Amino acid sequence: LAKGTLYLYFQNKEEIYFAIVLQGIRVLNAMFREAVKGKKPGLDKTYAVGEAFYKFYKAHGDYFRAFAYAKSARFDGDNGITAEIDRLSDENLGILVDAIKAGIADGSIRPDADPTKTAIFLIESSQSMIMLPMGFGKALGPMGIDHEDLVYHSLGLMKRAIENTRKR
């Protein structure tokens, strides 16, 4: 594909970039939907979303990094692509919020866990553990810590933090 041909479909580099991000968000959305399908209770659905987030990173690291970078303040253009990214991002958040609500309703998640605030906390905390700063990443090996083990340890800590220990 020649550069000139590419610009028949996209106005500029930013639009190309957001088209890539949109494709990644679609993949993540499908992975979130598959992760919660058939899972009960809500706590297990919530954990499954976190696990799907990590699996997305492992299988589609370029999409993951592109999406993380797109969330920066560097971009401010609104167009049809960014509107669709926002819609799917809200839908992805909604999948996690619904899992948390289900967990509160079935008693597996603490009743005082605000679903939206908890979902945002879980997503941002997971992303921080997945995308460790380079200094931490390099330090793990000499300490005998595997990055994947650290991510799953963190997911377990987050799960226990929202778990309802006073089951009905």
Image: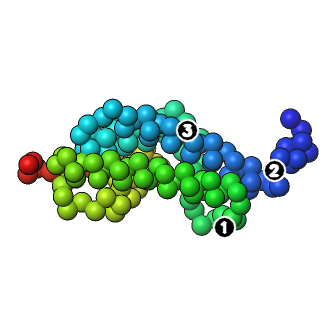
Mark 1 vs mark 3: in front = 3
Assign a secondary structure to mark 3.
helix
Which residue is depicted at the point 47% across and 49% down?
92
| Residue at numbered disc 1 | 76
Residue closest to the eye, 133 or 63: 63
Q: Which SS class for mark 1? A: loop
Which mark is drawn over residue 27?
3
> Where residue 149 sits: x, y (%)?
32, 36
At 65% from the left edge and 57% from the top edge, which residue is drawn?
82
Q: Residue furthest front?
A: 105
- Residue drawn where x is 91% and y is 45% of the image: 4
Mark number displayed over residue 114: none
Q: CA distance from mark 1 to mark 2?
A: 17 Å
Give amino acid for label 1: Asp
- Asked if the residue under mark 3 is in contact with the one under mark 1, i.e. CB atoms within 8 Å, the reply is no
For badge 3, the amino acid type reads: Val
Q: Which residue is mark 2?
A: 10
Q: Secondary structure at mark 2?
A: loop
State if disc 2 and disc 1 touch (CB < 8 Å).
Answer: no
Does residue 163 show up?
Answer: no
Quote the CA–CA distance across marks 1 and 3.
Answer: 23 Å
> Looking at the picture, how far across and down is residue 12, in whole percent?
81, 55
Q: 10 Å neighbourhood of mark 2: few (<14), some, or many (≥20)?
A: few
Q: Eyeballing the image, is 53 above or below 117?
A: above
**Pointer 1 or 3: first along the chain:** 3
Q: Is residue 10 above or below residue 142?
A: below
